[in-house]
Amino acid sequence: MIRFALPLGVFVLMVGLLGYGLRLDPKKVPSPLIEKPAPAFSLAMLEDPSRQLSTEDMKGQVWILNVWASWCVSCRAEHEVITKLANRNLVTVVGLNYKDKSDDATRWLQQFGNPYATSVIDSDGRVGIDWGVYGVPETFVIGADGLIKYKHIGPVTHESLEQKIMPVLRELLS
């Protein structure tokens, strides 16, 4: 009887941990990059691949990095909200075009509008990995000190813009 108690106990513990994990919200995964320096990159610009944008170019500014792709359905859902944010002209909104074909991305922006000051091309996804991107879309708020202040996983909604992102921006811009 005792020889069955240990495996049964381990099984019950594993089921309990699985049950707990399934109740967690994956959008609330804390980023280990918060209050850490934004990972450095220097990438070609989508609109002019002969030019580069780097994190050094953004030094001293509060800015937003929005990770998006033309193949991403959720990116289309958040596009109106990102456009609204960009139209407020509070901060520079930079797009990180993630694992996409440049022609598809350009066509997508022409069709739906381009809210970005510029988009940079991360065709192999290496910069996304450095930034801890789980999937697209994801949005980062970077302070003038170069530190990541906030990370939003998933599509930005009107509610998350007003309740999460705007308070962070107001604090950084005051």
Image (cartoon, rainbow, N blue to C red):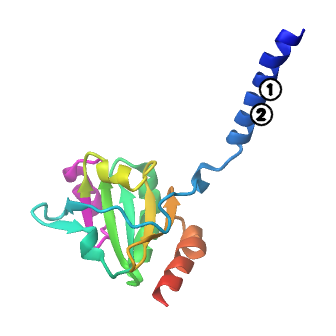
Q: What is the spatial separation of the Cα atoms under label 1 and label 2, in whole angstroms? A: 6 Å
Measuring from the top left, give residue 78's x and y in whole percent. 46, 62
Q: Is residue 43 left or right of residue 33?
A: left
Q: Residue furthest right?
A: 1
Quickly name the residue at label 2. 16
Measuring from the top left, give residue 132's x and y in whole percent. 43, 53
The structure residue drawn at horizontal position 50% and vertical position 63%, both measured from the top left corner, is 151
Question: Is 156 situated above or below 87?
Answer: above
Residue 24 magenta-highlighted: no
The structure residue drawn at horizontal position 13% and vertical position 64%, both measured from the top left corner, is 48
Q: Quadrant of the N terminus?
A: top right
The structure residue drawn at horizontal position 39% and vertical position 80%, both measured from the top left corner, is 144
Measuring from the top left, give residue 56's x and y in whole percent. 25, 72
Q: Residue furthest front?
A: 2
Q: Which residues are magenta?
A: 98-120
Question: Is 44 situated above or below 142?
Answer: above
Q: Amino acid at mark 2?
A: Gly
* Foreground pick, 103 / 24: 24
Does residue 98 appear in the picture of this structure? no
Quickly name the residue at label 1. 12
Does residue 142 appear in the picture of this structure? yes
| Disc 2: CA contacts within 10 A as few (<14), some (14-19) or many (>=20) | few
Dot 1 and dot 2 residues touching (CB under 8 Å) = yes
Q: Of helix, strand and loop, which one carries label 1?
A: helix
Q: Residue furthest left?
A: 50
Q: Amino acid at mark 1?
A: Val
